[in-house]
Structure formats: C-alpha cells, structure tokens
Amino acid sequence: MNFKALVLGLVAASAYAVPAFAHHSFAMFDSEKSVTMNGTVREFEWTNPHSWIHLMVQDAAVGKPLEWSIEMASPAQQAQRGWKADTVKAGDKISVTIHPLKDGSRGGQYMSVVLPNGQTLSNPGRRAGAAE
C-alpha cells in the first residue's frame, strides 16, 4: 500500500513539474540584429509568462501604421528593471529597440525602450545576442 502511495505521489509531482519545462527558446529572434522603431502603444500586457507591448509603427511602404508585437520578460523580471503595470499605456509614444523575428513578421524581443518622459529602460547586463 505504501508503494502505491509513493508511486501516486511521484506521478502527481512530475505532472506539476512538466509546465516548468514548457518554456520556449528565443531562437526565433535574430540576436545578430537590433531594430529601433518609434510608435504609439496600442496595448501593454503585464501578464505571465511574458509581458507584451503592442506598438503601432508607421510603415512607409504601406502608408499606414502596422502593429508590432514585442515580447518581454515576465512582470517579476520587468519589475526588477524598473517597469510597473502602468509604465506605458495606450496612446504613449515610445521608441523601442528589439531583436526582430527571423521570419520577418512584425514582432521581436524587447531590448530597451525610451519612454515619453525620456527615461530609458533596458535589460541591464545584456549584450547583443544574449538570450533572455
């Protein structure tokens, strides 16, 4: 009977551990390139497992603003870097530097931002090409 309880306990513990291994890699971002863009915040998602900035950036080729989705670290990690849930809000005009997606889609990995008040927030200790 104790053996069954032990096996059941191990199965339950491993089931809870599986999500920890589900984290994706950052291989989809081109860490050899950095792109800086100016735009207007459409939405800021302060959510786990990753925060997101949805930025409307004027596209000269199309003649209208297009949405870029910028993936950030978790709220806890961003808070350590000076972010709060209200650091940016819809309508804010910001400048963001990202590692773009390799497939050319409109998105990337957050590297730094210049806020409307001129303050710069970035990933301290980061070097070009480092994965988060």
Image: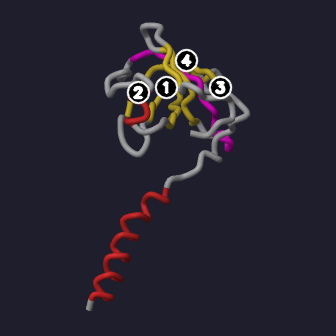
Name the residue that disc number 3 marks.
35
In 3D space, how far apart are the residues under numbered discs 4 and 1 (Cα atoms)?
A: 9 Å
Q: Residue furthest left?
A: 1
Q: In this picture, is 66 found above or below 49?
A: above
Q: Is residue 47 left or right of residue 18?
A: left
Distance between the alpha carbons at the discs numbered 4 and 2: 13 Å
How crowded pointer 3 is (Cα within 10 Å; few <14, some 14-19, many 20+) is rated as few
Which is nearer the N-term, disc 2 or disc 3? 3
Residue 56 numbered tag: 1
Numbered badge on residue 42:
2
Question: Which residue shows up at 41% across the image and 27% down it?
Answer: 42
Task: Judge depth for marks 2 and 3 and give the one in front.
Answer: 3
Question: In which quadrant of the rendered view does residue 48 lie?
Answer: top left
Q: Is residue 123 magenta?
A: no
For marks 2 and 3, give the CA distance. 19 Å
Where does residue 17 sit, x and y in percent of width and height? 41, 64
Q: Which residue is mark 4?
A: 38
Q: Residues within 10 Å of mark 1 (few under 14, many from 20)?
A: many
Up-down: is 34 above or below 30?
above
Nearest-to-viewer mark from 4 and 1: 4
Verify CB contact (< 8 Å) between mark 3 and mark 4. no
